Image (cartoon, rainbow, N blue to C red):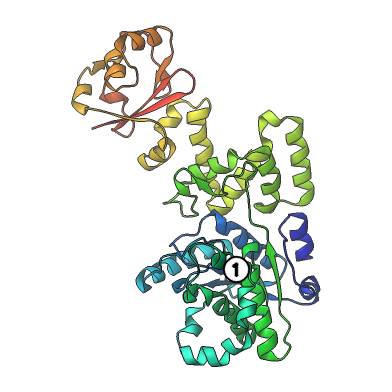
Amino acid sequence: MNLIEELRWRGMISEMMPGTEEQLLKEKTLGYIGFDPTADSLHIGSLVPIILLVHMQRAGHVPVALVGGATGMVGDPSGKSEERNLLDEATLNKNIAGIQAQLSRFLDFSPSNPNPALLVNNYDWFKNISFIGFLRDVGKHITVNYMMAKDSVRKRIEGDTGISYTEFAYQMMQGYDYYWLYQNMGVKLQMGGSDQWGNITTGTELIRRMTGGGEAFAFTCPLITKADGGKFGKTEKGNLWLDASRTSPYQFYQFWLNSSDEDARKWIKIFTFLPQQEIEDLVAAHDAARHERKLQKKLAEEITVFVHSREDYEFAIKAAEILFGNATTEVLQSLNETQLLQVMDGVPAHSFEMARLQGEGIDTISFLAETGIFPSKGEARKMLQGGGVAINKQKVEGIEARVNADLLLNNKYLLVQKGKKNYYFVTVQ
């Protein structure tokens, strides 16, 4: 398999050093990508580098994931308008452990594999290097002029905040990572986002100068953008995380399902492993009936199963049916409390006293008005008489109906529907 050819048709190649494709065709190659441990979970901005490593392994090469235990203490200025907060060692170690656990879900590290993935932490080689030693043995090989010419540095120098020596030195640290991996593990390729090109080429230059002409290769992937100009992977609640406890599989699924036609057409190539012919057929089927959103549905399915599981994907489908489809009361009742709260995240929330629902409970009109779902009993009565109210996906028949504790989901919740699309989630306590 020609890895570069595969990535090229998927739109995953931005810059590339001469000779890279030839190197990958010539022999099994070790290639690495760095992950900064700024949190204990990766987010969907990390999916492209993860997928690049998976493509490497599938093509018979050896993917190397580098967790930046040392560089994470410094901070990369690339794409940043101001200096970020430095993390303490305990937080950094927690983040590293979380990232390592996540990466093992996507890559095969088994020694029985002919090309097992490898995991390294650059703190392991930086912890024993003295400042004087680094300046003398490494720093002398790269000029300040060379470093200042990099976009990531120049933009910060020209901006209002400037750049500290700490962040200025980051590209030398990343460059030394590549040199160390080249010398000690035979790594000949570094990959990353296009904002990393400056740091990556510092590494290849350092290898050339410190080894007297050693050849190292590199390519980058375009940064993912949204057609509407919004930032990829950002929602009103912030980052979309790969950790299910931070971003539920349902929310994750919904993000991809709600992508525009233009974005889905591009993302189906980047974020799935579907073959070219299948994607072309899918695009054609989508264009023939855009209202069916076949492209978005397949994209959401593939990436949710990849990051989470088939079971989580099926739950996301069930959850979407509750709010946007024709799910029954039984489907709603089948959800446990955690799943129910995931589905209702973002649905307008109301509360009610448990005591009011004991025994025969309360008449539905009073319940709807007192929760604030309707501004008055008159409006609640009018909607009820028109058959426009449902509780727990069950249409309320008649104005005499009552609400009592027997209706509660997980002994605590009620889902009220007003009209076709307006939902309200009531917590009773």
Residue at 28 percent of width and 24 percent of height: 406
Q: Is residue 31 visible?
A: no
Q: Position of residue 241 (x, y in %)?
A: 48, 53
Give the left or right position of residue 42, taking residue 151 as reference: left
Q: Can residue 163 be seen in this view?
A: yes
Of 6 and 266, which appears nearest the observer?
266
Q: Give the answer, above or below, for where 47 lies relative to 368.
A: below
Quadrant assignment, res 139 = bottom right
Determine whether 198 is above or below 268 in the image.
Answer: below
Q: In this view, does 333 lie above or below 101?
A: above
Viewer-proximal residue, 311 or 194? 194
Q: Name the residue under label 1.
A: 154
Residue 155: horizontal and vertical position, in percent?
58, 64
Relative to 5, 160 lies left or right: left
- Residue found at x 47% / y 71%: 72
Q: Residues within 10 Å of mark 1 (few under 14, many from 20)?
A: some
User: Which quarter of the rendered picture does the N terminus lie within?
Assistant: bottom right
